[in-house]
Image (tube, helix red, strand yellow):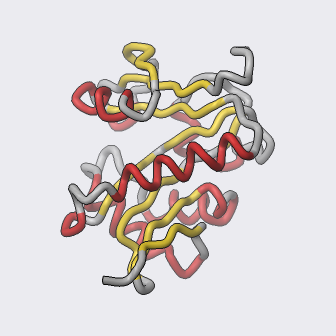
């Protein structure tokens, strides 16, 4: 079996990213093609793709900001991205349906955490459903309770991983 690799996204990945997002989220929660295209155009280096032999098996994406909390507007407006922002927001982490339960999402999450640390960020923030809070806690994220986000009409919990070498602000 060939090796797995992680890379940033390029415009040619748009259809694959759209398909993955559709596999991972219900229609009201997922980013559609236009939204992904805007993100990809604005911050392609904030997409982490895990692939084998050119096939993308999983993706993680989000923007950087100086805001502490993930707001619904961030999902919709890529112009809110700040390349030097203190917090890496995570919008989606999804593995292709036929490649799940192999640790691929964890690999991407660890890559994003390492990248945020290397870039001197304060940490990472995401929202997830209650049943996934334990998953993210295993990576060091702390559950901050129910989020103010109502993205897709769902109930979300905000999770934060703060690097110890940064004060919380």
The residue at the point 46 percent across, 28 percent down is 140
User: What is the quadrant of residue 45 in the picture?
Assistant: bottom right
Q: Nearer the viewer, residue 71 or 56?
A: 56
Residue plotted at (25% across, 49% down): 26
> Residue 159: horizontal and vertical position, in percent?
45, 25
Q: Is residue 154 visible?
A: no
Question: Could you tell me which residue is drawn at 72 percent across and 46 percent down?
Answer: 118
Q: Is residue 38 left or right of residue 85?
A: left
Residue 113, compared with residue 150, is above or below; it is below
Q: Residue at x 45, y 15 (%)?
A: 144
Compare residues 82 and 102 and report the one nearer the observer: 102
Query: Could you say where residue 103 lies in the image, as x and y percent from the top left?
Result: 31, 55
* 89 over 57 or under it: above or below: above
Query: In which quadrant is the N terminus drawn?
Result: bottom left
Q: Residue furthest right?
A: 84
Q: Position of residue 59 (x, y in %)?
A: 43, 60
Query: Which quarter of the picture shows residue 100?
Result: bottom left
Camera sees residue 5: yes
């Amino acid at each position: 079996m060939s090796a797995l690799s992680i890379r940033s996204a390029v415009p040619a990945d748009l259809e694959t990213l759209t398909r993955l997002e559709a596999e991972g989220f219900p229609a009201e929660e997922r980013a559609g093609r236009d939204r992904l295209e805007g993100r990809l155009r604005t911050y392609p280096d904030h997409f982490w793709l895990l692939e084998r032999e050119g096939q993308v098996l999983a993706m993680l994406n989000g923007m950087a900001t100086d805001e502490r909390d993930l707001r619904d507007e961030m999902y919709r407006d890529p112009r809110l991205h700040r390349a030097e922002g203190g917090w890496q927001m995570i919008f989606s982490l999804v593995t292709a349906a036929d490649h799940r339960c192999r640790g691929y999402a964890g690999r991407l999450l660890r890559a994003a955490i390492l990248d945020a640390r290397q870039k001197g960020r304060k940490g990472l923030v995401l929202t997830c459903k209650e049943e996934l809070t334990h998953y993210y806690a295993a990576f060091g994220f702390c559950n901050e309770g129910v989020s103010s986000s109502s993205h897709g009409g769902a109930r979300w919990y905000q999770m934060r991983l703060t690097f110890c070498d940064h004060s919380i602000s």
